Amino acid sequence: MSKQNRPQYLVSSDSIGFLGSPEQFLYLWQEYFDNKTLDGVEVIAFKPLSRLNKLVSMFKKNNIPVLAFHGKTGGEDRLNFLPRIIMTLVNFFIINVENLLKYFPEIEFLSHGPYFEKNSIKQIIFQQRRQKIWIENHLHGKKGVEEAIKQINFYRENRINTDGMLDIYHYISHSIDSLPINWPNLVEELKSYILLKDKNGQKFFNGIHFPIGTRFGDSLPIDSMSDEILELFAQKIIPHVERVVFENQQANLGLLFSTDKMIGKQKVRNRRIIERFKNTGIIL
């Protein structure tokens, strides 16, 4: 794949948590925008609106494109007990889609399949949406992907510019313990979904979430994944997607905030991971 045909590479703002500052994000990631490793940000749309405005303004001032918002996920009741509690709290602190589309009409919007199932959300999207929406698989494994495909079809049939975002961890989470053995088969399954097209010949999934964080309940075990595993993924998947989003949720209190020491450790870890991704072809 030539440089000009490479995917867009985004990083999520989740790396600084709910209470993180714009300055922390710049410290972690500015160099990767300056050297063109990263192309934009997927911002977790945390409340209040004034804080989100400040964050978006800071990105614009530093020539960092905000390409998408990650909104509420919905579907908390479909999760196991602890993830259900965590996501209920997280979603409480995320701005609703109506205000995001009203105040930031130029920015794409992403959420999970269950959120887009709600009739109230459908009506808001139909009335306000001008930019693309992205629908992410919510539940683990094939069921989550099939739910997302159903919603992608529905919105496309209603003339909404819609793409799928395939979250790699959500798909493979039940195979984490046997990853070295199952990885080739999992990658082939992922590839089959990424190449799958609707009745008009349009691919369902043009983007992937590749979670690299330290909150292992929603992140790939990057530090224990071999270069061979990453290289196989790069060969089979990267040529077929338009967007790659690196999520980077931090463990424990890092979901909320990070101290200077925590940010320093994360920066070192991020640098190591980004270099591995360049060496193995995940990042072109």
Image (cartoon, helix red, strand yellow):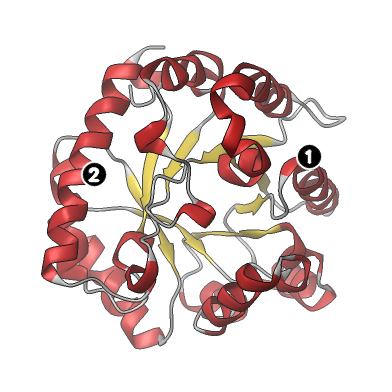
Apparent side of residue 40 relative to residue 25 in the rendered image (left or right): right
Apparent side of residue 229 relative to residue 201 in the rendered image (left or right): left
For marks 1 and 2, give the CA distance. 30 Å
Tell me if I can see residue 33 in this picture.
no
Neighbours of disc 1 within 10 Å: few (<14), some (14-19), many (20+): some
Task: Identify the residue at horizontal 33%, vertical 48% (top origin).
Answer: 40
Task: Identify the residue at horizontal 38%, vertical 45% (top origin).
Answer: 10
Neighbours of disc 2 within 10 Å: few (<14), some (14-19), many (20+): some
Residue at label 2? 270
- Which element type, helix, strand or loop, lies under badge 1? helix
Q: Earlier in the sequence, mark 1 or mark 2?
A: 1
Q: Amino acid at mark 1?
A: Lys
- Position of the C terminus, as image quadrant, is top left
Task: Identify the residue at horizontal 24%, vertical 44% (top origin).
Answer: 270
- Which element type, helix, strand or loop, lies under badge 2? helix
Residue 231 percent coordinates (x, y): 42, 16
- Position of the N terminus, as image quadrant, is top left
Q: Amino acid at mark 2?
A: Asn
User: For this rendering, which residue is in front, 93 or 6?
Assistant: 93
Residue at label 1? 142
Residue 56 percent coordinates (x, y): 31, 69
Apparent side of residue 130 relative to residue 211 in the rendered image (left or right): right
